[in-house]
Amino acid sequence: MTGATHRLRAAVAVVAAAVCAAASAGCAVSDGQFVLHYTTYSSPTSDQSVTMQRWAEEVEDRTDGGVRVKFHYSQSLVDADEALQATLDGRADLAQVGSLYSASDLSMFTVIELPFETNNPEVQMTAIERLYEENDTYRRDFDRQGAQLLFPLPLGINLIGLEEPAPNPMALAGRSIRSGGLTSEALLTVGANPVAMTATDVYESMERGVIDGYTSLAIANLPTFGLASTTPYLVDPGIGAYASSIVVINAELLESMPPEYQDAIGEASGNAIPNGLEEMDKLGVQACTDLRATGAQLATMPPADIQAWKDRAGIAQQWVDRYAERGYDAEGVLADYRRIIGEESARSTYVDPFYACLEGEIR
């Protein structure tokens, strides 16, 4: 290392240490090396955590050990609804931020929860990144919070697991179904009874007859919660992408890093979507194998019935009106989201693992 390089790194370390003390106290800096604390509500073996592990390994490799990540899984550091604030007040440097917990801090991010917009997870993930770059209203929420988006984490399309079949949306009427977010609003419009419940409680609640089914889960999530081998009917209701989570970093901390470290983080983040889809597909194959072994029946609801449900629910317009009243150009965000979905759908060949399982394909 030359004297000039050493002085540069020493200067960066001084700046970064100040940032770590004021904005992100969990960060440790020594001789220009960074240890970033990552908080997540996911388990160590989930597809989302494995995606982040691959990112951390790539960043460490690209920076020759200059940037390392310490993981705090399963809300062991902070609760899921505090993750974003934790990157600002010093409890963490990086965080998995779920859209279900973002209505107040990252309001425009929740556009990706709107049902019936896309059934392609790759398209939704790419739209999250493009909205951040292309829509000022969407980006402004992140800037105001002092957070920078790095990349989205994988999540498949919304499915409904049931004890008894439901050939169309109206067949859900009267059933108690575990749900969350805007999916619950959609269920109400067809007479179902959405039940708020953590995913870890679904298995026992199904066994005891407390609920008739569950949603707000994708096929890759089922093995984690013991549902891939205990769900007799699994149906695609046409809701499609229904939520997401993203990885964010304290913006000041990132800016304090040497340019080559920032570049390394950016390059690794650019690989996160394909890596995430790869990890989600692996769990999807596992779920499909378990479902087939138990004779579970997979189905999709008719497109005409799905369109009628979308029209009846009117959730997108409600979302626009709700945030327009708060001063957001929500209509512009939704228009850009739909434009990007159209553009990316024409490019993407990705197929959600549920459809691959339905068609008898194993990837």
Image: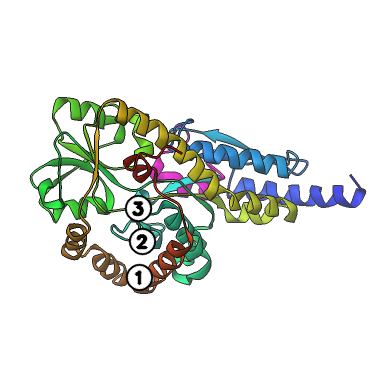
Q: CA distance from mark 2 to mark 3?
A: 11 Å
Look at label 2 and name its amino acid. Val
Residue 153 x, y percent position in the rendering: 47, 47
Say which quadrant the N terminus sits in: top right
Using the image, tell me which numbered label, if any, was put on residue 241: 3
Q: Depth check: 289 or 213 in front?
A: 289
Look at label 3 and name its amino acid. Ala
Q: Which residue is mark 2?
A: 111
Residue 150 x, y percent position in the rendering: 55, 53
| Circle 2 residues within 10 Å: few <14, some 14–19, many ≥20 | many
User: What span is colored magenta in the figure?
Assistant: 75-93
Residue 111 in the image: above or below residue 205: below
Q: CA distance from mark 3 to mark 1?
A: 19 Å
Look at label 1 and name its amino acid. Ala
Q: Which residue is mark 1?
A: 330
Helix, strand or loop at disc 1? Answer: helix
| Circle 3 residues within 10 Å: few <14, some 14–19, many ≥20 | many
Residue 147 x, y percent position in the rendering: 53, 56
Q: Residue at x 20, y 54 (%)?
A: 302
In contact (CB < 8 Å): disc 2 and disc 1? yes
Q: Is residue 361 visible?
A: yes
2 or 1: tag closer to the N-terminus: 2
Q: Is residue 228 visible?
A: no
Which image quadrant is residue 334 in?
bottom left
